[in-house]
Amino acid sequence: MPKFALSDIPEVKGLIRFKKLLINDVCQYDQFFDQIRKEGNLSKQLIGLLNNLNQVANLKRLPKEKFRDITPAKDPVKEFEIKKGDLRLYVFKDEAGHIVVIGGKKSTQDEDIGWFRSIKKQYLESKK
C-alpha cells in the first residue's frame, strides 16, 4: 500500500482549503506543473488553472467549462475536474479539504480520470 501525505498549495488561498496529495513522497501535482512549465507552450493556461483554483477556494461559482462535478452516481465522495483550455486538475473532497490528486491534458482525460479514481480509492482505504 502506498504511503500518502497531504501538503498545502501555497499559490491557492481562500475559505476552501486545497491540498496536494503526495504518494510515497512524490507529488503528481508538482510534477504536472513542472512538466507544463518545461514544455512552455501552455504556461498561460497553467496560470489560468491556478486562477480557477483560487476562485473556487474563495467560493466563486464557475461555469462547468471551468469547474465541474464528475462524481459517479452513488459515490459519496465528491469528485471535481478543474479546467483551463487543454489542462485539467482532478480533485476530490475530504475532511482535510479538497485534495488535488493529478493534473492532465484534455487528450488524456479518460485515462487520467481512471488513474485519479484508482488513487482516490487507495487513499480512502488507507485512512480506514
Image (cartoon, helix red, strand yellow):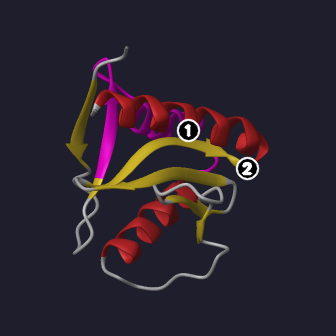
Q: Which residue is mark 2?
A: 106
Asked whether the beta carbons under mark 2 and mark 1 sit within 8 Å of each other, the answer is no
77 or 119, which is in the foreground?
77
Instruction: State yes or no: residue 30 in magenta.
Output: yes
Residue 27: percent from left, percent from top: 36, 30
**Which region shows up in magenta?**
19-42
In terms of secondary structure, where does tag 1 sit?
A: helix
Secondary element at tag 2: helix
* Tag 1 residue: 116
Q: Residue furthest right?
A: 107
Left or right of 85? Residue 8 is left
Give the mark toward the camera: 2 or 1: 1
Q: Is 54 left or right of 117, judged from the image as shown? A: left
* Closer to us: 51 or 66: 66
**Residue at 39% in and 77% down:** 55
Q: Split into 4 quadrants, where in the image is the N terminus?
A: top left
Q: Quadrant of residue 7?
A: top left
The type of residue carrying mark 2 is: Lys
Q: Position of residue 86 (x, y in %)?
A: 69, 54
**Whole-Å distance between the Cαs marked 2 and 1?**
14 Å
Q: Position of residue 26 (x, y in %)?
A: 34, 22
> Label 1 crowding class (10 Å Cα cut-off): few <14, some 14-19, many 20+?
many
Q: Is residue 27 above or below residue 71?
A: above
Which residue is at a point 55% across and 31% down the rendered structure image?
A: 118
Q: Is residue 116 magenta?
A: no
